[in-house]
Image: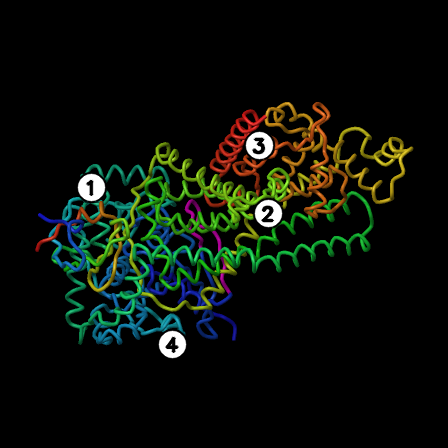
């Protein structure tokens, strides 16, 4: 299964689940629910953190945080 | 008509929804900043006259996405909204929502409805939502949620009058319930309801989920809750994920009914284009450093004039008092202790104001989130956080506002490390000390035609401070245990032009909290230092004039020269002088004598006092003119060697000492305020001064 950290700029995927329970609570509260579309926008100059779009707004997170979000594509 | 009704109204909403703007719109200058007990967020409250008969106390709560706190500071929200015994427990709540991102804002709303609190939904940024093509049926939304809904524009104030009317009108709690407590948690919830006489299921459920956040509970009550939790095998967060999914399901159902036309993201195109440049590998950093340069230029260039004026103003004030007040010890205390003490506080105001003007503009425009984004990776290597960049840079101007600016860092560990290392950044108060010592020991010559040696040494000192900050952060990273995980999950707000009244109010707020919080300690220590420098044991000080006259009887001194001699004599025999002499054995290995010792002690008030103290010791009168002091230092002879006192070894040793040492009581006062105790400022004092001593020792011993 792929995760958000493995996506490339411009790619769109659908959130299928989380691998970190603590983080999943925070992420879901910000609208990253299973079944929601997520778009990978761009990365910071050293490849980390990254910026994604989800339910109509932009979010930045670290690669290690993004890696806990599984996507289906 | 006199005010009859008085409401307490809490303002909640997610970050970047416009909560501060709304708070400013409602309260204007009637704001009061205090502290919530135990946490570091400011408690912002303000008064608002809703109508002639109704006044409201508005309580601004930290920006949150959900009722479950993400950081220690956010616990204050639970504390206030779930505990009727809290003195700030509101009569009603206003939830400000970002209409362009309604779904995420409604999560918190459904939680507040479930808590049984009467709430008004204020929809902000409707203009942007309209631009995005979004169309919402507000009447249906109000019916579905069973709460009043009002459109506002927190930036220009449209809709605020409507909102005020709603805030003053009778407001029943919503009849809806969004989250039925899990079946497994029901019996435990019932037990809590019975024990604490609660009517609301969700409040009782929160007693189980967030026991630690409810500060008013007694030990015995806590034990009861723990027992109930254990008995029913509940633990905090057990059903939190399920709850969030359930709530979003209900919200989506409502949105399906009320959204007439959905948004497209065309309106964000400009913002995306700006991001492409601002977060670019090369342009991104270039723009960032260009902005930094601008900020520094303004802090040094623009603050100079008002700072000089303040200095002059206080000098005149002291002079005026000298002619209008009766002489005596009280008079001396006022003119030499209290007034310079207050002056020492006020003089920082221009720099603090300018720095916070910039920070506030960068934050308001949305650029700050990009700085964090650009710098996070680099900063994380040394145990800091993308959000540490602003405080560190601000530390080059002054550590006081810099430490105040660490409040944006959510992780307590990251924030503590940032607070701890920021004073290593060479602040503007070190500059006069650097300037005079560098000019004294480094020849003014050019290398390769362009590099000025003095300039290179000066830059080296700034680099040295920065390196010390980074290395200390790295060490702290391994020593301090994290109370919570360091996260960067952060919304990237759309770019927009700053709202100037918000910038103005931020400046006022920060300046006020500096003057009144740190000011108290600065003033107290100034007075102590004054006492030490003006009193001494025995009658030496009373007889100063006579003793000096005797010793210089055969010299021909001008009246001014004589007065300077007396001042130097007094300082030498004061408690400060005695301390200076008694620490001489300790500082001799660094190459210093007791005269420098006195300067080190008085520098504790503020580093720039070094120059003034040396001027007094070397009988130069009140002058702080750099060239005069420099010439005098150059001719000072070390009686033991017969060589000049300020050799390169001594000079570099002093420079290194001033780069590292914690010699700023204002900073300590602010650290105490921000960390809520004396523990960290004391560790900081010991660590920095220890490092300074050791480094100065090594430098002196290896150079001499």
Q: Is residue B450 left or right of residue B204?
A: right
Distance of label 3 from label 4 (alpha carbons): 62 Å
Which secondary structure lies at badge 3?
Answer: helix
- Residue B481's place in the image compared with B287, above or below, is above
Q: Are marks 2 and 3 in contact (CB under 8 Å)?
A: no
* B200 w.r.t. B257: above or below: above
Whichever of callouts 4 and 1 sits on the residue coming sooner in the sequence is 4
Q: Position of residue B218 (x, y in %)?
A: 37, 40
Disc 1 crowd rating (10 Å Cα; few below 14, some 14-19, many 20+) is: some
Q: Is residue B32 magenta?
A: yes
- Ranked by sequence position, the earlier of labels 2 and 1 is 1
Q: Position of residue A38 (x, y in %)?
A: 16, 58
- Of the numbered discs 2 and 4, the one sitting upstream in the chain is 4
Which residue is disc 4 drawn over? B158
Mark 3 and mark 4 lie on one chain; the one further toward the N terminus is 4
- In this figure, which residue is indicated by the disc labeled 2? B520
Q: Which mark is residue B653?
A: 3
In the rendering, at what x and y percent does residue B574 appear?
Answer: 74, 33
Q: Earlier in the sequence, mark 3 or mark 1?
A: 1
Above or below: residue B15 compared with residue B656: below
Question: According to the image, label 1 marks what residue?
Answer: B234
């Amino acid at each position: 299964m792929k995760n958000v950290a493995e996506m490339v700029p411009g790619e769109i995927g659908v959130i299928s689940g989380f691998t970190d329970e603590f983080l999943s609570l925070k992420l879901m509260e910000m609208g990253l629910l299973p079944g929601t579309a997520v778009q990978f926008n761009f990365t910071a100059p050293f490849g980390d953190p990254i910026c994604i779009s989800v339910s109509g707004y932009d979010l930045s997170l670290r690669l290690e945080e993004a890696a806990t979000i599984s996507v289906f594509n | 008509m006199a005010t009859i009704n008085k409401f307490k109204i809490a303002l909640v909403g997610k970050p970047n929804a416009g909560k501060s703007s709304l708070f400013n719109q409602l309260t204007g200058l009637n704001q009061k900043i205090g502290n919530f007990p135990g946490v570091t967020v400011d408690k912002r409250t303000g008064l608002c006259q809703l109508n002639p008969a109704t006044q409201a106390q508005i309580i601004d709560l930290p920006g949150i996405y959900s009722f479950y706190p993400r950081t220690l500071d956010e616990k204050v929200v639970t504390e206030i909204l779930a505990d009727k015994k809290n003195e700030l427990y509101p009569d009603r709540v206003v939830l400000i929502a970002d209409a362009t991102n309604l779904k995420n804002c409604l999560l918190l709303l459904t939680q507040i409805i479930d808590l049984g609190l009467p709430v008004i939904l204020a929809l902000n940024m409707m203009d942007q939502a309209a631009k995005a093509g979004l169309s919402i049926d507000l009447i249906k939304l109000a019916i579905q949620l069973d709460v009043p809904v009002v459109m506002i524009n927190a930036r220009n104030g449209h809709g605020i009058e409507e909102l005020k009317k709603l805030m003053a009108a009778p407001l029943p709690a919503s009849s809806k319930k969004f989250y039925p407590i899990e079946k497994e948690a029901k019996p435990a919830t019932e037990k809590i309801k019975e024990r604490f006489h609660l009517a609301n299921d969700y409040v009782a459920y929160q007693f189980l989920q967030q026991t630690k956040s409810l500060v008013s509970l007694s030990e015995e009550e806590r034990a009861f809750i723990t027992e109930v939790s254990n008995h029913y095998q509940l633990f905090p967060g057990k059903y939190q994920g399920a709850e969030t999914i359930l709530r979003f399901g209900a919200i989506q159902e409502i949105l399906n009914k009320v959204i007439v036309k959905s948004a497209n993201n065309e309106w964000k195109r400009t913002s995306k284009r700006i991001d492409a440049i601002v977060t670019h590998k090369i342009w991104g950093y270039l723009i960032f450093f260009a902005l930094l340069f601008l900020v520094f230029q303004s802090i040094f260039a623009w603050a100079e004039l008002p700072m000089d004026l303040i200095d002059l103003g206080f000098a005149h004030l002291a002079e005026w008092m000298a002619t209008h007040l009766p002489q005596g010890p009280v008079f001396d205390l006022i003119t030499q202790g209290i007034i310079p003490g207050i002056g020492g506080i006020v003089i920082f105001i221009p720099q603090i104001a300018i720095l916070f003007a910039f920070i506030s503009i960068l934050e308001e425009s949305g650029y700050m989130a990009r700085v964090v984004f650009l710098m996070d990776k680099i900063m994380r290597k040394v145990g800091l956080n993308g959000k540490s960049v602003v405080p560190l840079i601000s530390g080059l101007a002054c550590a006081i506002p810099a430490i105040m600016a660490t409040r944006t860092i959510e992780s307590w560990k990251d924030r503590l490390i940032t607070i701890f290392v920021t004073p290593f950044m060479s602040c503007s108060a070190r500059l006069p000390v650097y300037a005079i010592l560098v000019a004294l020991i480094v020849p003014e010559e050019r290398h390769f035609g362009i590099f000025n040696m003095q300039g290179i040494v000066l830059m080296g000192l700034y680099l040295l401070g920065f390196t010390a900050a980074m290395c200390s952060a790295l060490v702290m990273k391994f020593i301090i245990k994290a109370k919570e995980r360091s996260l960067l999950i952060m919304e990237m707000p759309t770019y927009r032009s700053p709202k100037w009244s918000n910038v103005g109010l931020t400046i006022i707020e920060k300046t006020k909290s500096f003057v009144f919080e740190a000011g108290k300690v600065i003033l107290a220590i100034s007075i102590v230092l004054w006492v030490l420098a003006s009193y001494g044991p025995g009658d030496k000080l009373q007889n100063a004039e006579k003793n000096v006259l005797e010793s210089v009887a055969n010299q021909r001194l001008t009246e001014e020269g004589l007065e300077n001699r007396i001042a130097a004599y007094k300082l030498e025999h004061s408690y400060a002088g005695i301390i200076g002499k008694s620490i001489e054995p300790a500082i001799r290995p660094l190459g210093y004598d007791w005269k420098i010792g006195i300067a080190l002690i008085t520098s504790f008030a503020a580093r720039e006092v070094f120059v003034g103290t040396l001027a007094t010791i070397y009988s130069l009168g009140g002058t702080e003119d750099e060239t005069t002091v420099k010439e005098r230092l150059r001719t000072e002879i070390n009686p033991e060697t017969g060589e000049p006192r300020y050799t390169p070894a001594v000079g570099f040793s002093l420079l290194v000492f001033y780069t590292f040492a914690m010699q700023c009581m204002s900073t300590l006062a602010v650290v105490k305020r921000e960390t809520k105790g004396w523990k960290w400022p004391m560790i900081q004092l010991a660590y920095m001064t220890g490092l300074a001593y050791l480094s100065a020792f090594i430098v002196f011993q290896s150079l001499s």
